[in-house]
Amino acid sequence: MSVGGPAATSGDPADVLATVVRQEWGRLTALLLARFRRLDLVEDALADAVETATRRWTRDGLPDNPAAWLHTAARRRVLDRLRAEAMAHRKAPLLIVEAERVEGSPVLADPGDLVEDDLLRLVLMCTHPALDPAAASALTLRLVLGVSTADIARLFLVPEPTMAARITRAKRKIVTAGIPFAVPSADVLPERLDTVAQTAYLAFTAGYAPGSGPDVVRTGLAGEAIRLVRVVLALRPDAPVLVALLALMLLQHSRRDARVDDSGRIVLLPDQDRSRWHRDEVDEAVRLLRSPGLAGPVTLQAAGYAVQARIAVEHATARTAAETAWDRVVAHYDELVALTPTPSARLARAVAVAEASGPHEGLAALAGLDDLLAHSHRLPAVRAELLTRAGDRDGARAAYDLAIERCGNDAERALLLERRADLRPDRDGAGGRGGRVTPTA
Amino acid sequence: MRYVVLIAYEPGGWAEASHEVRQQHVDAHHAFERYVDEHGRRLSSAALSDADLATTIRRDGGGSDVVTDGPFVELAEQIGGYYDVELPDLDAAITAGRLLPRAYTVEIRSVVGVEGYESL
């Protein structure tokens, strides 16, 4: 597919422009960067072109091919700047001659492969492992998806000048360190796609850090991260790490409307209204997990995403929380712990073991985690719940105290205080209300 | 692009190394140099004397700079040498740097001009 496919020549100019920016920004940036290799000029020129379009299209009507119009306007802007620089320095006349010589060439009629390859090069440049991962996420949203710096700042919950400085630093590093605009050789590409996935997942999880900031905004960031993975997956449809990551993201994202109640409080997984889950996204994730590419040998990272996605599928496809196939969830967690024996994976496995086999087995599975999770509030929170179920109220109370002391998140602390208050000595039965172990929402 | 590849290592590593380990180091340096020769060029390189033999000039902002024995920071790892090379881009520099002995931490810095001071 080349830049400026089917033209949208009717409709409100502002809407058309927004759509073109959303769909074509990355391709336009990649195309201009392939030609001029000047990150600073290209981005400014595109932004200028969009601003000019806002005025021009409203006045003169929509152009036949809006994307091509933006491309031409931005290309002329870059040439103007190069010409001005050449005049100032009188040392780059050859560059100008070369740029003008090819200006008339039919770029927009290029076979699609070329443009798509440029887009992949852009993504790989923005997600280079030599860049700070958080800055790389932001830069990728800016250059590949065309999200404005102001919007990115809002999505990451930082002041706009802070985000602008972060993006500027990343761009400066690209130029001064010589980070290439290139697709690496086939033996390195899989590990570079792993970094692309990591970068996208970082943005995604920043969108789901619980309890901080308005949820609507954070959902927006998760949505942009998914869009980024879709863009790259369209370029490398069989890349296992991208297939697995998209499945995982879709499953987590599908619960967005059920995770918070009307008063803004977190609703835990077992209590969520499953009719509010986005079923189409669950179905797509299930299809993705059946991809042949995931059956073969994959990187550790891809395998990790796939197993986490399969755990999420067990929850997403259970008709009610009670119908969850906990034995299969435990089996998936065994696999996850074998792949990446992180303390948090082991903690989650213990929760699943408790659901499948009872609180005593769950408590036994927590053994050895105290030293590894010395500051986590989740470990004592889980232990408190399991002790409650096992009938040890004093032990549960002490564990809740520790969890409350360690918890830095207001919404979660409120939940813990509530659970502790439920442990009245006169209260009979060990089950509590519904037995919500997992703090996962 | 011009890169300086700084090599950091645990002090004493070479002195205590066996003959085999020393040979592995030498082979790795040769692999690095072959890669650079194929993809760019070597400008200079050097192994440095131990950091505890360094001499430091401490500037106090007034007129009395103090010359002292030893490095200006004590670190577990110390710069033990460098390569100054030309390579097409950072990926090539990373590929080359990965060829160096595994005992090293490698820092890659591009060489930049200082604006207005072309001769620097």
Image (spheres, rainbow, N blue to C red):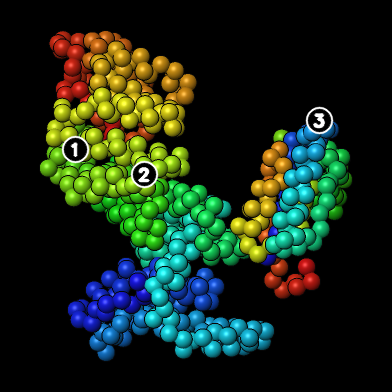
Q: Residue A317: which disc?
A: 1
Mark closer to the chain start, 2 or 1: 2
The verdict on a common chain for dots 3 and 1 is: no
Say which residue appears at 63% left-offset and 86% top-offset.
A94
Q: Is residue A430 above or below residue A18?
A: above
Q: Quadrant of residue B105?
A: top right
Q: Residues within 10 Å of mark 1 (few under 14, many from 20)?
A: some
Q: Residues within 10 Å of mark 3 (few under 14, many from 20)?
A: few
User: SS of the residue at dot 2?
Assistant: helix
Say which residue appears at 41% left-offset and 28% top-offset.
A337
User: Residue A298, image x and y in percent?
Assistant: 43, 43
Task: Give the position of the N terminus of chain A as an image quadrant.
Answer: bottom left
Q: Is residue A418 above or below residue A364?
A: below
Query: A199 and A377: which one is in front?
Result: A199
Residue type, label 2: Leu
Q: Please report contact status of discs 2 and 3: CB closer than 8 Å, yes or no.
A: no
Q: Chain of mark 2?
A: A
The verdict on a common chain for dots 2 and 1 is: yes
User: Residue A356, image x and y in percent?
Assistant: 25, 21
User: Residue B73, image x and y in percent?
Assistant: 75, 41
As measured in the structure, the alpha-carbon distance from the residue carrying label 2 to the one carrying label 1 is: 20 Å
- The answer to whether residue B47 is visible is yes
Q: Which residue is mark 3?
A: B18
Q: Which residue is mark 2?
A: A294
Residue type, label 1: Thr
User: SS of the residue at dot 3?
Assistant: loop
For the residues carrying marks 2 and 3, which lies nearer the camera in this image?
2
